Image (cartoon, grey):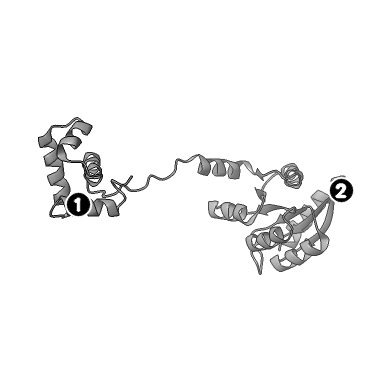
Amino acid sequence: MAGGLRVLVVDDHPLFRFGVCTLLANEPDIEVAGEAASGANAISAAAALRPDVVVMDLHLPDLSGIQATRHIVAERPDAGVLMLTMADESESVFAAMRAGARGYLLKDAEPDEIVRAVRAVARGEAIFGPDIANRVLGFFSRPPPVSDPVFPELTGREREVLSLIAAGHNNGVIANMLCLSPKTVRNHISNVFAKLHVADRAEAIVRAREAGLGLP
């Protein structure tokens, strides 16, 4: 980038903010364009200075870093936001991602890790500290939650029978389709009626179709 990478550093702790600014200013390709100690100041500074990257703390005295990030990214989608914070809760990580942050590091990260993250975010990459990355990967690798079955009081076989009843099949057809004896089908139907507290086949069909069973 011509003229160097322009960075805005946002943190309400003067000593930490000074340390980050000093770290980045020592890099030949990085220019510290400005600094801010609050969310509101971060928004106005980002608009005035047009930095390539905003290094953002999460906890600020007025607007949170999440709120400030949302404002900055909405106004300047090309600006990369790197969260640099002590907050390691999953809720904070995913809230930052939803707000538009491209990176998330903890404040105990090594100095060279912070510099690499700033450059990566400027290139449009998503970057996370090792612990945060493992948490993000773990979240997205979990299988989706299994939704509760319709009529959980029924067994799987009873739900199959009810679905076929709702589709308009008689007992003989159901027996053939499920490879069951007619007597077994009748027993399943009796159990379904009892568990659903319905009086007859017609009422069972209404209940089943209301729940989405037996529909084409």
- Looking at the rendered structure, the kind of residue marked 1 is Ala
What's the residue type where badge 2 is placed?
Answer: Gly
What residue sits right under mark 1 in the picture? 204
Q: Quadrant of residue 11?
A: bottom right
Residue 125 falls in image quadrant: top right
Picture coordinates of residue 164, whole percent (x, y): 24, 42
Extreme residue in the right direction: 3
Mark 1 neighbour class, 10 Å CA radius: few under 14, some 14 to 19, many 20 or more: many
| Side of 11 where 149 appears, left or right | left
Residue 200 x/y as whole percent:
13, 52
CB-based contact (under 8 Å), mark 2 and mark 1: no
| Residue 79 spot, x, y in % from top left | 75, 54
Of all residues, the one furthest to the top in this rendering is 179
Q: At 16% from the left edge and 50% from the top edge, which residue is drawn?
A: 201
**Mark 1 or mark 2, which is nearer the start of the sequence?**
2
Label at residue 4? 2
Residue 56 or residue 73, whichever sits in front: 73
- In the structure shown, which secondary structural element does the residue marked by tag 1 occupy? helix
Residue 87 in sight in this render: no
Neighbour tally class for label 2: few under 14, some 14-19, many 20 plus, Cα within 10 Å: few
Q: Is residue 10 left or right of residue 63?
A: right
In the picture, the quarter occupied by the C terminus is top left
